[in-house]
Amino acid sequence: MNPKITRFLAEQTPATPCLVVDVDQVEARYRALGKALPLARIYYAVKANPAMPILTRLVGLGSCFDAASWEEVSLCLEAGAHPEDISFGNTVKKVSAIQAAYRAGVRMFVFDCREELEKIAQHAPGSRVYCRLLVDNYDAEWPLSRKFGTTVESARDLMLEARALGLDPYGLSFHVGSQQLSAEAYEAAIARVASLFTDLSDAGLDLRMINLGGGFPIRYREDVPEIDHFAGAICRAMTEHFGNALPEMLVEPGRFIVGEAGVVHTEVVLVSARGRQDGPRWVYLDIGRFGGLAETEGESIRYAIRTARDGSPTGPVALAGPTCDGADILYEKSHYDLPLDLRSGEQIDLLGTGAYVSTYCSTRFNGFAPLSEYYI
Amino acid sequence: MNPKITRFLAEQTPATPCLVVDVDQVEARYRALGKALPLARIYYAVKANPAMPILTRLVGLGSCFDAASWEEVSLCLEAGAHPEDISFGNTVKKVSAIQAAYRAGVRMFVFDCREELEKIAQHAPGSRVYCRLLVDNYDAEWPLSRKFGTTVESARDLMLEARALGLDPYGLSFHVGSQQLSAEAYEAAIARVASLFTDLSDAGLDLRMINLGGGFPIRYREDVPEIDHFAGAICRAMTEHFGNALPEMLVEPGRFIVGEAGVVHTEVVLVSARGRQDGPRWVYLDIGRFGGLAETEGESIRYAIRTARDGSPTGPVALAGPTCDGADILYEKSHYDLPLDLRSGEQIDLLGTGAYVSTYCSTRFNGFAPLSEYYI
């Protein structure tokens, strides 16, 4: 576990549940990604963790930002980002949000359908736009495909339409799904985008940008391929399809930048055999699916757990949150083992919880206050 | 739709998304339940909606309260409830929460395992305790069974143990699952509880209370059996098993009291054919699974929808929330139809959203502020 966070927890003994994020590690991850993909501009996906200490650190490093809402645009500006370094990256935007972002100087917007394109043309005239393609999500542990993106055929028509509407038809994007374990997903998506680049060029429209989305995986319980593995595959695919005429490349990492930098510190509220000798013990924590661990839905994201008793004999457990909701179960099928002498009142740590935790947290489900956050 | 809420929305035109709850309708539902089950004391399940106007109205009506946390206990006290009218109804409680509730005068606690019983004995000495049994959830649309409750055998041992620990072994509880459509679920659970009453009486321990939990269904898209149907089945089962020696009866309704009294007013952010002529249109709202509609997970709870264009020709739609999260889809498989001329920027209403909406809402996922609430 991150030694800086370990020290902070030992010295400060903050009340649980809380999230502690090492902002230096965020910086290290940003730099590592920049080194692996030197030709790509990094647009940090603010939704992964919009805490001000993270945004200001990234602004200082020269990061650009992918915002999901006017509120996130506004946070980036507050952190010191220039509006031209912000992409409004949600394909679903209220007119009032487009207007507010445009007034603030944002000039890059995504879309994936004609209706949204027309809204952008009307309320953010002349802006750069890019169209999101539907691509295969392969081995993503938190897939995205059904809700967003359009077909190659439709994207072709829409990019031509964008020009006709007075917009700047800038490029194409895709998202292979979050926590994507397969580099092939990027390769296949790049091939699809490249064919459309060619097709549109034949139609007299030269696109300049390819947005590779995010999805780069981080370590939870299991090892994942290193970023160099993905970067290598991306570079090979880009060179294969574009040769020396590489378009601008954008990436939108969120989880990759902040995930491993965070630790959720939580109290064991109860350990119970539930009256059965044959089943697993049930371990109830003071954080659950509605306290921020939403990505445990379907047991999709499986966090690594550290206890003060690591090394002593373990046995199988089911893990659940503190609410009266039957759906507030973290892991029943994912074969977690915890020390046999773990007791209620003890504290344990959930690693890799810097991304997509603090923001999912409910306002007060079952009366519980939102997760406290510390950025160190 | 509720005429008082219709008038409020027309006159006040509040910004979307928002939740509007008719507190008079909450009162009417409370009274209806009291009339259907005159022998049962009502412990309102605060977690369904802990808004102060609801709690104060219910205090005025003489309601008791089922609290899921110390924070909910505290809210009830703030609303004017007496501590003896509060049940700490979460089987998973922090020691600090038990201590705080006990200090505040709360003397009724639930448990479902030895570890929790020992915590209560130590930190809330002499209190009334009841044990939660695991029962079949039959046709519950939001089931609860795996996480809570214990076996009849274990409950028997634990109630005897409770006495030995100096606690007051008050009774037994069960929960048939929320939005339960089958009266048989209550009948079967009562039979199970009754056999344990007898068994414990033979062992020299006379229990005095049966807590029937909640779960009474409300109308969403489809009609559900009336409360009298459930009340009749419960009374018959109680009489069959207990004769004239009826124990005290408690119920813990949440959804039944507040669900139908609430309307979520939301804006259509986008309507899109997504480049396909054969599929449904996609309708994106400014509220989704992470803005409060958590019970649409797995399309479990299917809200009725009202539009200003009701009556005009309709076609199939998929419904999704406003965030960049691929999991933020409300309904894809539940065969929703909406007017063909529905357009982005228009407002629509989700009915029956008074329960389990405001509190599930995330603090700021994708930057969106929590749902505004109006109690009228």
Image (cartoon, coloured by chain):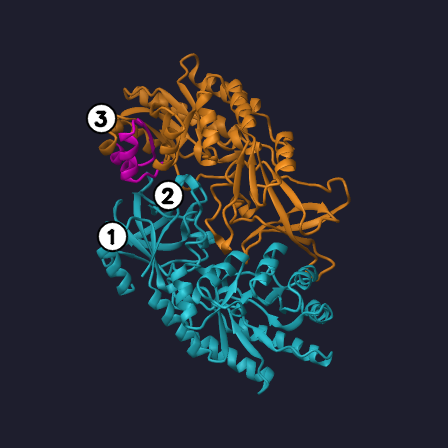
Chain colours: A orange, B cyan
Residue A171 sits in which quadrant?
Answer: top left
Residue that sits furthest to the right in the current view: A313
Residue A203 sits in which quadrant?
Answer: top left
The amino acid marked with disc number 3 is Gly
Q: Chain of mark 3?
A: A
State how many labels appear: 3
Q: Residue B364's x, y, as percent?
A: 42, 42
In the rendered view, would you say A72 is above or below B22?
Answer: above
Q: Residue at x 49, y 27 (%)?
A: A186
Residue A233 visible? The answer is no
Q: Which residue is mark 2?
A: B322
* Residue A166: assigned label: 3
Q: Chain of mark 2?
A: B
Q: Quadrant of the C terminus of chain A?
A: top right
What stretch of residues is rendered in magenta? Answer: A91-120
Whether labels 3 and 1 belong to a single chain: the reply is no
Q: Does the stretch in magenta take in A106?
A: yes
Q: Residue at x 69, y 70 (%)?
A: B159
The amino acid marked with disc number 1 is Thr
Q: CA distance from mark 2 to mark 1?
A: 21 Å
Q: Residue B252's x, y, as percent?
A: 50, 68
Q: Which of labels 3 and 1 is toward the front?
A: 1
Left or right side of A196 for A48: right
The amino acid marked with disc number 2 is Pro
Q: Which residue is mark 1?
A: B13
Q: CA distance from mark 3 to mark 1?
A: 34 Å
Asked whether A302 or B30 is in front, the reply is B30
Whether labels 3 and 2 belong to a single chain: the reply is no
Q: Quadrant of the N terminus of chain A?
A: top right
Per the image, label 3 sits on a secondary structure element best described as loop
